[in-house]
Amino acid sequence: MVNIEDYGDFETAWCPGCGNFGILKSIKQALVNLGRSPHQVFVASGIGQSSKTPHYLKCNGFNGLHGRSLPPATGAKVANHELTVIAVTGDGDCYGEGGNHFLHTVRRNPDITMIVHDNQIYGLTKGQASPTSEIGMKTKVQTHGVFNMPLNPLSMAISLDCSFVARGYAGKVSHLTSLIEKAIQHKGLSLVDVLQPCVSFNKLNTFKWYSERVYEMDDPGYELNDCVKAFDKSMEWGEKIPLGVFYVNEKPTFEDNLDVLASGPLYKKSPSTEKVDELIDGFV
């Protein structure tokens, strides 16, 4: 039987009170609840405070370049599609430097779970505005306030027909754990954008600010496969901020389209030259 201790307990480099702790706890608990042992899990990340997560999990891990968490995550899933693959990233890492990878990973729809620590700031590099920073937010770099329109990652994902789109909050660990479980169980690319207060550099979107605004969606008439309603809901932001699953669309995964995987994990065999060419073509 799997338990939390199996995933280790490590000293972290995160600031005391950081929202990342709630996300790490939720990831561990979700994997335990699903009965996934460490050897069955692969976690990939790029660069950032969020991307230190693989350092604090006792499982298979890869910490790579800024914005590049999704390519190794996809590669790991293709090499061994029996793995539970999680890409851990941040709003700058994923929606900024890694924006192009995000768009095309949605197109491919690999069966991986993408957890974005969305703190609306660059935390590792000491507080520049990120793609999701609010208009008017003042930082050490944007001293007169942010004037660029913030990116709405949920709306973008839904418009691209991402097969699972959800939002959680680091201050609601139990609810976030449930969302991550659903994301891992979903077959296809799952986006879980997590509102994650940065206690050091974001003095606007604090735990108090979020706690006064977030609410869990509970509409029995809400159809998860209705992209129009999901898109409309994703635009709700301000005095009320919805949490939960916004959109689900079951469709073939990237691995489903690779015949070479039909007879078992790729790492267990030496595919022919033709199969290798077919696999490479699948990434274009």
Image: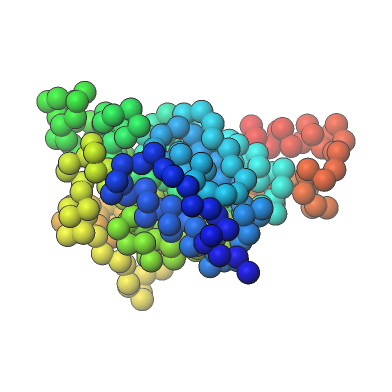
- The percent coordinates of residue 144 (x first, y second) are 12, 25
The reply, left or right, for residue 88 in relation to residue 236 is right
| Residue at far bottom of view | 220
Quadrant where the C terminus is found in the figure? top right
For image coordinates 53% across by 67% down, the residue present is: 33
- Number of numbered discs on residues: 0
Q: In this view, does 262 lie above or below 44?
A: below
- The percent coordinates of residue 68 (x first, y second) are 52, 32
- The percent coordinates of residue 273 (x first, y second) are 85, 31
Q: Which of 147 and 51 is in front in this view?
A: 51
The reply, left or right, for residue 253 in relation to residue 168 is right
Quadrant where the N terminus is found in the figure? bottom right
For image coordinates 71% across by 33% down, the residue present is: 281
For image coordinates 33% across by 27% down, the residue present is: 125
Q: In this view, does 264 lie above or below 272?
A: below
Q: Which of 9 and 128 is in front in this view?
A: 9
- To which quarter of the image does residue 198 belong? top left
